[in-house]
Image (cartoon, rainbow, N blue to C red):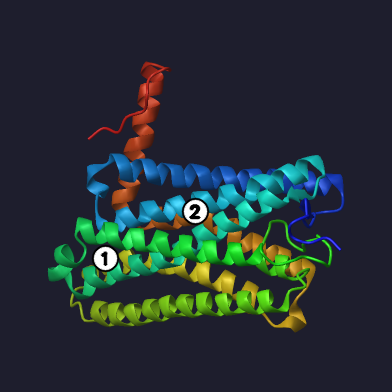
Amino acid sequence: MPNSSSMAQFLLLALADRQKLQLLHFWLFLGISLAALLGNGLILSAVACDQHLHTPRDFFLLHLSLTDLGCICTTVPKAMHNSLWGNTTISYTACAAQIFFFLFLMSAELPLLTIMCYDRYVAICKPLHYGTLLGSRACAHMAAAAWASGFLNALLHTANTFSLPLCQGNALDQFFCEIPQILKPSCSHSGYLREIWLMVFSYCAAFGCFIFIVFSYVQIFRAVLRIPSEQGRHKAFSTCLPHLAVVSLFLSTIMFAHFKPLSISSQSLDLGLSILYTVVPPALNPLIYSLRNQELRDALRKLITGCFSEAIKSPSSVCYVPH
């Protein structure tokens, strides 16, 4: 029987069984990927180049855009390649790398969203202490902690999963490599239990982040409702709604995908949900944040205007951001 050391490749789930539908999925993935790359790339450029966006909120937004870019680049290119060429294979090494980087980025995204919630809590509930609690050093330490926790979580899960012997085939019921799909053909009871305990620990940490976000927003809404002027309440809400929308999209899709009742589970539903939480959020997050963030919209407008102006003057010149 084949095991993890001799397994040369895995078979991924085909998105469709007909060539025309596979090409349709390719173009759909291509469009979503380009939208995600363009949106997150513009946010990265705007935050990096515009002095007005050198704030803690936009600093963490930059890191969130990095995770979104990484997620879309980890799973989608291989799926597009398989759809275009009618292929379903992925090598053992590529599968391990895909799981590690996807887990690394997804595990870092929730702490980053939690830190961004803390930023809004301090800005609204403790505005006089904002500069002290969210100084440049504190922001750097919190961002580093988020990335470090994601790296450690991905390393532990990937090392344990790919140390398990696989003796029940190499077919995965997913369009990308995912730990639950790797565990299905595993025949090591102790290793399977070890991975379950690692998952329980990860879910507990994620639940802690969720509780912190809920508690913070309860305090935020109570503070906002005490603001006497309607204009002040509107401004406070407008700084929180994009983050709340991104958190809701991120958590609702993942929770439903992993904790839905078995009675409604099906291969097509699982495939649709996996696309929903891996591909859609990276494309929508830039749009959500730019809709209610006037400073970010102004910076993006200056960035795009500067690029077009320079392209008209000199096609070979580099884009700049006017101040």
Residue drawn 49% across the image and 80% down it? 204
Question: Closer to the N terminus: mark 1 or mark 2?
Answer: 2
Query: Crowding near pointer 1: few (<14 within 10 Å), some, many (20+)?
Result: few
Residue drawn 33% across the image and 49% down it? 296
| Residue 35 falls in image quadrant | top right
Q: Nearer the viewer, residue 87 or 288?
A: 87
Number of disc labels: 2
Q: Which quarter of the figure is the N terminus placed in?
A: bottom right
Residue 123 in the image: x percent, y percent?
22, 68
Residue 17 in the image: x percent, y percent?
86, 53
Inspect the image, locate mark 2, and give the three-letter code of the amino acid beneath it.
Answer: Asp
Q: Nearer the viewer, residue 265 or 177?
A: 177
Q: Nearer the viewer, residue 308 or 156?
A: 156
Look at mark 2 in the image and give the residue it sits on.
Answer: 68
Inspect the image, locate mark 1, and give the three-letter code of the amino acid beneath it.
Answer: Lys
Report if residue 28 is visible in the image: no
